[in-house]
Image (cartoon, helix red, strand yellow):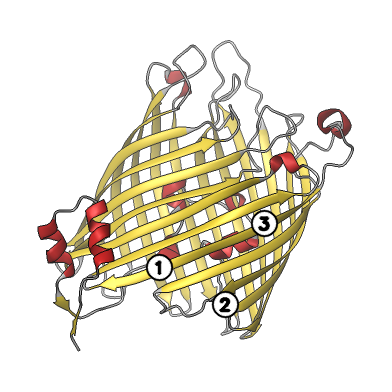
Amino acid sequence: MRQSVNVPSSAKELFHNLHIPMKLTSLLLNQRVAIQPRRGTLTDSFPQIRRSLGRPPSSRDFALIPLGSLALMGLLPLGAYADELDTLQFQAGQSVQHDSNVFRLSDSADTQALLGTSDRSDTIAVTTAGFKVNKPYGLQRFEVAANVEKHNYRNFSNLDFTAFNYGAAWRWSFTPALHGNLTTDRREYVDTTADVQTTGQLNRRTNRSTVFDAEYELDGAWRVLGGVFERTSTSSQPFTFEGDYKIRGAEAGVRHVWSSGTSLAYRFKNGEGEYPGRTLSAVSASDFTDREHELRLDWAPTGKTTVKARLSHFDRAHDGLSVRDFSGVTGQVDATWAVTGKTSITGGLARELGSYQTTTSSYYQGLRFFIAPTWKPTEKTAVRLRYDHGVRDFRGPLPGFMATDREDTTRLASLILEWQPVRALKLMATAQRDRRTSNAPGFDYTSNVFGISALASF
């Protein structure tokens, strides 16, 4: 059944703010078309973490994001949604968690000398409030999600901060064969894994990304892909070994889709980037160029199993300081198996490369795996387990410096219990153990986190 779609002034204002010509606005919005479900929603992609980071996210990117924040951002299932078909949803949450080692200090560190107290633990309360808008207009769909997080530390109040996170998407379609996405997002979080040089401080990382991508269906199987992007990552601390960056680039490729739904895509990505605040010297690079050849597979071998795989060759070249260059094979494979109607298991394996600039290293290469079973004994309860194990090797010393052959091993185990007593409320309790060992002194730590949270949607 075909529906007539009227154009509200708010949609026109959005197009005007995006500097889209009025003729094109009329073409996109004043259509008499059948409203149909679109591929993916902001709930699935916000805050566009893969594009913000420029790599697949690992569990450590979410290690200490409050549970309430995860749910508000769509990263945890939130069965307490008012209604997934609602155009506008408001959400609120409160979480309290106790962290036994909030600064991730080494077991051998002198806590009294570094912090002025023998207690390295803290209790953090996080209050979150946000909203989501999801509205179709003809072939178009507009999505907006935003939330505010207020973090309060009981002992180390100097760490208090308020974060504003958002994501917006225009799922555009000029014709059924030509479609794509225009997205932008921002996420601020405590990066507990950053090795900062200032003791008694935490690093807050802010990731931003803006992406425009398009797909044109040549026939029933082949599609042409293209897009442009801009990504930035900044830290609250003046210097981190991982470094701030800003990169702009483009990508192009092809994708083949079989009748079964399996797809295989190839993309070439090229980006020009910089490390803000750094000037070219004998030890520091200021600009770089990224090139990546990527293959991506989406496959469902059975009705109960799905596999997503990515294999790429990544190369980063630094202008004027080739000693900082690195390249190699990266990739990730994730699989999900629905064992029964109540039990599922997800697992994955990934190989990573990343910048890490000191005098004794220029980059790291890592290998990690995870397994995450989920059991839902009733419609209102769920038990989620997850274990991550990763190893990172640090390589690329500067001339005149000896390689330390530093190797870090991380182990992260978590348990989440969920209960939804009523449709609009979800309660959660979590326990987490985060441990890193290293053959380099001072880089080991152990942290135990326990927390509870409440999430509401209306």
Residue linked to disc 2:
80
| Between discs 2 and 1, the one toward the N terminus | 2
The amino acid type found where label 1 is placed reads Val
User: Does the image show residue 75?
Assistant: no
Q: Name the spot of residue 142 as percent of width and height, x first.
A: 32, 65
Using the numbered discs, state the Cα–Cα distance from disc 2 to disc 1 in whole angstroms: 16 Å
Using the numbered discs, state the Cα–Cα distance from disc 1 to disc 3 in whole angstroms: 23 Å
Using the numbered discs, state the Cα–Cα distance from disc 3 to disc 2 in whole angstroms: 19 Å
Q: Nearer the viewer, residue 362 or 186?
A: 186
* 56 to the left or right of 6: right
- Label of residue 421 in the image: none
Secondary structure at badge 1 equals strand
Which residue is drawn at the image coordinates 72% and 39% (left, top)? Answer: 158
User: Does the image show residue 263?
Assistant: yes
Dividing the image into 4 quarters, which one contains the N terminus? bottom left
Which residue is drawn at the image coordinates 52% and 42% (left, top)? Answer: 206
Residue 261 position (above or below residue 101): below
Mark 3 nearby-residue class (10 Å; few <14, some 14–19, many ≥20):
many
Residue linked to disc 1:
133
The amino acid type found where label 2 is placed reads Ala
Secondary structure at badge 2 equals loop
Mark 2 nearby-residue class (10 Å; few <14, some 14–19, many ≥20):
many
Q: Which residue appears farthest toward the bottom when viewing the image?
A: 1
Q: Name the spot of residue 346 as percent of width and height, x first.
A: 56, 67
Residue linked to disc 3:
126
Determine contact: label 3, label 2, CB under 8 Å. Answer: no
Q: Which corner quadrant of the image does residue 442 belong to? A: top right
Which residue is drawn at the image coordinates 48% and 44% (left, top)? Answer: 207
